[in-house]
Structure formats: structure tokens, C-alpha cells
Image (spheres, rainbow, N blue to C red):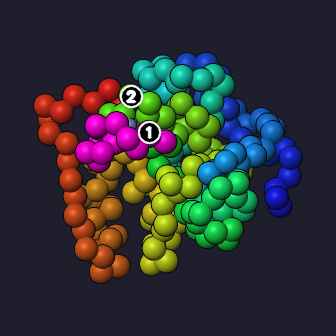
Amino acid sequence: MTSSPVMRAMLFRRAGSAPAMEDVATPIPGRDELLVRVRVCGVCRTDLDIVDGRLDPSRIPVIPGHQVVGDVVARGDGNDGPAVGDRVGIAWIHWACGVCRWCIAGLENLCPQFRSTGCDVNGGYAEYVTVPHAFAHAIPPELSDAEAAPLLCAGATDTVLQNRVAVPVLRRHRCSVMVSRTRSTHASPNR
Ligand SMILES: [Zn+2]
Ligand SMILES: [Zn+2]
């Protein structure tokens, strides 16, 4: 492992107060996990919901941020995912079980065991973050860090951005764009 045992991170401790920079232990990747050195992390409306108290994180303190682009610097055991040195993205879905009816249907955000980045587990407002390798997303080289980061949001940001930013950026890079939306009647306990 090439990282320091201590890293700087923005910790959220109480609704109504902004996250503050603190020194915390650098996370160690567990089995099937990656340690990622963060390049950029976007700001989502969901992060503001946490800070303002409209959304309660399941852990306090928590490091918010779920639009993460960074480089893999270490891998835990049992890992056949991205290699050290690969650039990856980390999105709102930190982990889902993969075997329930919602996961099999591709609706991992409805998984009863769903865990969200930056709310249920620590996110990207830090020098390092861990992620299960199955939920680390390859970033096409055509996209810059800042262009890729908002695309990793689950919705609160890119419902606004997808037409104004994401789709034009992807089209500029000659990517095929396919947008799917949940129905307005589709009740989602998660974002
Ligand atoms: Zn599931
Ligand atoms: Zn978001």
C-alpha cells in the first residue's frame, strides 16, 4: 500500500453544520475492495440534503460525496476487478446484494441491503476511499475527471444535468447516449 496511514477528509457530524476537514485513518481495502486515491468528487443535491438535515445518514460522522473519480492504488484480497493504476468512478450505489429480485431486475437502488456512498458508508470528500470492485466503474479516456464525475450521480444532480451537461459532453465525444428514467409512479426509498 502506497498511501499514508492518515488522510485528510471532510467529515459531516451534525445537520445544519458544514462538513469540516479532519485527519482520519486512511481506509484499508477489505476483501473484494479497492482503495482509490480521489482525483475529483462532485457536489450533489443529495450532499446538500445531508448537510441541511433533509436526509439522515445511517452513520455519523460520515464523509459525504458520491460523484468520485480516482485512481486505484491498492486492492484487497480476492480481487479480480480493476488493476492498480486504473482510473475508476464511484457512484451513489456503493453496494447491493446482487441476488434479490430488485438486483436481478437491474434496480439495485431498491435492494433491501442497498448501501449508498457518502451516506451509509464514507464517500469521496477525502484523499482516499474504498469501494467494492464490482461497483468501481471504468471511465472512458475521452472523458476528463470533471466531465465524468457528475455522471456517477444516481439522479438528484443529473436529472438537471443530463440534458444540459452530460448528454452534450457525451455527444461531443461521439458516445452513444441512452437515457433511462424511472416512472414518476416508481416509489424509490433510495436515491
Ligand atoms: Zn439486492
Ligand atoms: Zn447524486
- Taking depth in this image into account, of 134 and 57 the one nearest to the observer is 134
**Does mark 1 have its CB less than 8 Å from ligand 1?**
yes
**Residue 78 visible at all:** yes
Q: Are marks 2 and 1 in contact (CB under 8 Å)?
A: yes
Label 2's element? loop
Is residue 181 left or right of 27 when viewed as pictured? Answer: left
Q: Name the residue under label 2.
A: 112
Which residue shows up at 74% across the image and 43% down it? 27
Q: Please say if 26 is above or below 85.
A: above
Q: Quadrant of ligand 1?
A: top left
Q: Mark on residue 10?
A: none
Q: Please say if 85 is above or below 107.
A: below
Is residue 109 left or right of 59 when viewed as pictured? Answer: left
Label 1's element? loop
Q: Of the residues shown, which amino acid type is indicated by label 2?
A: Pro
The quarter of the rendered structure image containing the N terminus is bottom right
The quarter of the rendered structure image containing the C terminus is top left
Q: Please say if 147 is above or below 135.
A: below
| Magenta residue span | 95-109
**Residue 44 visible at all:** no
Which residue shows up at 14% across the image and 35% down it? 184
